[in-house]
């Protein structure tokens, strides 16, 4: 099934309420605590395993959407018109072209783009929410998350606040692969962003996933390891056990990066600063501070710790940006 057919199928359920002239929406970024890495279907962004994330409150993407009037898509990002020949424009254009109108897309990020901070997740989630309102679909959020998924896998989880699970699904057509908000909350949890590099990543996660899946000898273990990590993570949330959450999240991120390091060619998103910060976390933990990290497709780390330790963590990591 192609993306276009997938969209037509979902939109059969949509209402066609009168169209609005312009809408403005927001979607939060999310950080995966159990990661998504690798697709069973590249066209429809269907993952080999489920994943689980926490949304980042007011850090994300704001999008204002209207009709362009000339059947083409136009993109303004953080106040600048984006050239039609850039990979960024092409990716956004490919997504909006599925809806066969022609849009004026004005989008602003409150997080660095392309540095492994899941900005594509909030971007495609916000585009989907905006389309739903502008075109009057009134779809439920699980269907919207399937549409967001076509833009970026991690966008599947960016339609909600709090903890969200992306069910991998088993169907070939991807209709059972969508986000599910969890009832759990963990008020003491703080996510801190340790930003070393705001540059675009050296290799896109899309490409890196394919290389890893096709060449790492460790990748065959990934679905099973991830399934077990999800069970332990759900247990940690149910028991409100911060340490278990941190341990599972850190280990799962390290396993994801191990599959990349052992791919051919090797993919290494870490910089010397990343490794230095990891070692600092391990040292502080040895001294009794419950502090963990996770890392996505970029050199930056996200620290996980409890509210009561905010002061001390900030002392050790100057420039930490707290969510
Ligand atoms: O949504 P994508 O294709 O950019 O993939 C994101 C993958 C990770 O951020 C590394 C992990 C995740 O689950 O978000």
Image (cartoon, rainbow, N blue to C red):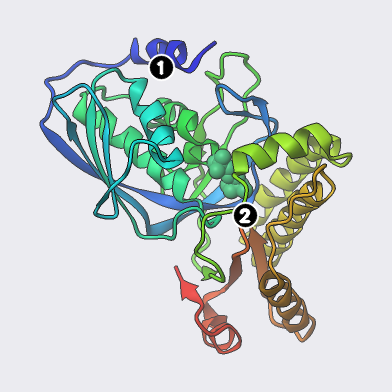
Residue at disc 1, secondary structure: helix
Say which residue label 2 marks.
296
Please state the horizontal and vertical placement of residue 21, each as a whole percent of the image: 10, 31
The quadrant of the rendered image in which ligand 1 is seen is top right
170 sits to left or right of 225: left
User: Could you tell me how many numbered marks the image carries?
Assistant: 2
The residue indicated by pointer 1 is 7
Task: Tell me which residue sits at (41%, 46%) in the image.
Answer: 122
Residue at screen point 24% across, 54% down? 79
Residue under the image location 34 percent in, 36 percent down: 84
Look at the image and tell me whether residue 112 can be seen.
Answer: yes
Residue at left 59%, top 44%?
204
Q: Residue 247 location, x and y as percent?
A: 73, 62
Where, quadrant-wise, is the C terminus in this rendering? bottom left
- Please tell me in which quadrant of the rendered image residue 302 appears: bottom right
Circle 2 SS class: loop
Quarter of the image with the N terminus is top right
Q: Quadrant of residue 56?
A: bottom left
As drawn, 14 above or below 180 = above
Q: Nearer the viewer, residue 239 or 23?
A: 23
User: Which residue is nearer to you in this view: 84 or 101?
Assistant: 84
**Residue 36 image position (x, y, % from top left):** 64, 41
The image shows residue 20 at horizontal and vertical percentages of 12, 29
Q: Is residue 191 above or below residue 288?
A: above
Tell me where residue 268 sits by quadrant: bottom right
């Amino acid at each position: 099934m192609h993306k276009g057919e997938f969209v037509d199928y979902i939109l059969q359920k949509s209402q066609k309420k009168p169209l609005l002239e312009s809408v403005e929406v927001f979607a939060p970024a999310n950080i995966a605590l159990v990661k998504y890495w690798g697709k069973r279907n590249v066209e429809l962004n269907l993952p080999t395993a489920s994943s689980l994330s926490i949304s980042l409150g007011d850090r994300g993407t704001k999008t204002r959407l209207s009709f362009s009037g000339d059947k083409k898509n136009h993109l303004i990002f953080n106040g600048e018109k984006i050239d039609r020949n850039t990979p960024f424009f092409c990716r956004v254009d490919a997504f909006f072209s599925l809806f066969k109108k022609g849009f004026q897309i004005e989008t602003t990020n409150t997080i660095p783009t392309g540095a492994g901070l899941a900005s594509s997740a909030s971007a495609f989630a916000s585009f989907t929410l905006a389309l739903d309102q502008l075109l009057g679909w009134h779809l439920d959020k699980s269907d919207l998350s399937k549409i967001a998924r076509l833009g970026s896998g991690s966008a599947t989880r960016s339609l909600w606040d709090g903890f969200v699970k992306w069910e991998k699904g088993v169907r070939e057509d991807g209709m059972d692969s969508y986000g599910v908000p969890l009832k759990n909350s963990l008020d003491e949890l703080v996510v801190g962003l340790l930003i070393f590099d705001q540059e675009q990543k050296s290799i896109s996660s899309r490409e890196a996933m394919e290389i890893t899946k096709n060449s790492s000898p460790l990748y065959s273990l990934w679905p099973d390891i991830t399934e077990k990590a999800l069970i332990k993570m759900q247990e940690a949330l149910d028991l409100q056990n911060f340490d278990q959450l941190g341990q599972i999240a850190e280990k799962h991120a390290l396993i994801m990066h191990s599959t990349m390091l052992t791919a051919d060619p090797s993919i290494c998103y870490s910089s010397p600063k990343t490794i230095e910060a990891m070692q600092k976390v391990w040292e502080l933990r040895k001294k009794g501070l419950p502090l963990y990290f996770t890392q996505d497709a970029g050199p930056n780390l996200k620290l996980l710790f409890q509210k009561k330790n905010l002061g001390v963590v900030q002392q050790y990591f100057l420039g930490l940006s707290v969510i």
